[in-house]
Amino acid sequence: MREKAEGIVRFENERFRATEWRFSPGAETGWHVHGHDYVVVPLTDGRLLLEEPDGRSRHAPLTRHAPYGRGAGVHHNVVNDSDAPLAFLEVEVLEDPLLEERERVLQCFVDAWNARDVDALMACMAPDCEFRTASGPDADGARHVGREAVRAAYAAVFERFPQAAWTNETHRMIGDLAVSHWRFVGHDREGRAVEVDGCDLLRFSGGLIDCKDSYRKARA
Ligand code: NI
C-alpha cells in the first residue's frame, strides 16, 4: 500500500482549474483518467513512475519549472519514484458549456438545411433573430428581421431551390461568432444547376443564432 498524494485546488474558474499535487517519497495519485487537456508545471525536480493500464510502467524525470502538456483521456497512476518530496501544479482546461452548446446548435443548423427542415432551422434561432441574404437591394443584401420573417425567408430558399445541398461544410467559432463555409450545390425551379461557394457569419446570443449573414461567390 502506497501513501496517497495530496491534491489542493489552488485556482478554479469556469475555464481553468489549477491543482497542486504534493507527493511524499513513494506516494501515488491512484488510478485516474484525465477528463480535460492539462499542463503540468513541476514545482520541484524529481522522478515519476507512471503506471499505465496495459501493465507497462515507465519513468519520467520532472524538472522544476519545465512544463509539459497532455490531452484528455490519459489513464494512469502517478508515483513519486524519488527519495525526496515532489510537487507539481496541474492546470486543466475545462470545457466551456456555452461553446459546446453553440457547436451542437451549429451542427443542427447545417443538418437542418440539408434536411430542408424549416422547424429545425428555427429551433436554432434566437427569439429576436435576423437573416441577411447574400443578394438583395441593400448594402447588407436583404434583411429579414424577426422570427416570422426569417422563417418565411428560409422557406423561400427551399421554394426557390427544389434540390439543394450544402456540402463540404467547415466552421470555426470565434467568440460569439461562427464562420461557416460551404459549397452550395442545387437546381432552381427552372432546372438550372447552381454550384457556388459561400459562407455564413452566424452571430450567437446565448446558445442560439441571432443573426445569419450570408455571402456567396458571384460567378462572372
Ligand atoms: Ni494524471
Image (cartoon, grey):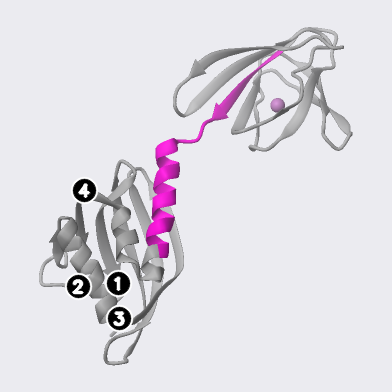
- Location of mark 2 (residue): 135
Query: What residue span does the magenta drawing correspond to?
Result: 87-111
Amino acid type of the residue that numbered disc 3 sits on in the rendered structure: Phe
87 horizontally vs 217: left or right = right
- Location of mark 1 (residue): 216
**From where the camera sits, is residue 133 visible?**
no
Amino acid type of the residue that numbered disc 1 sits on in the rendered structure: Arg
Is the residue under label 4 in contact with that under label 1 (CB below 8 Å)? Answer: no
- Ligand 1 within 8 Å of the CB at mark 2: no
**Above or below 195: residue 84:** above
Which sits earlier in the primary sequence, circle 4 or circle 3? 4
Amino acid type of the residue that numbered disc 4 sits on in the rendered structure: Pro
What number is the disc on residue 127? 4
Residue plotted at (31% across, 41% down): 206
Mark pair 1, 4: CA separation: 26 Å
Mark pair 4, 3: CA separation: 26 Å
Residue 90 included in the magenta stretch of the image:
yes
- Ligand 1 within 8 Å of the CB at mark 4: no
Residue 211 placement (x, y as % from top left): 24, 54
Instruction: Classify 10 Å Cα crowding around label 1: few (below 14), some (14-19), many (20 and above).
Output: some
Figure quadrant of residue 79: top right
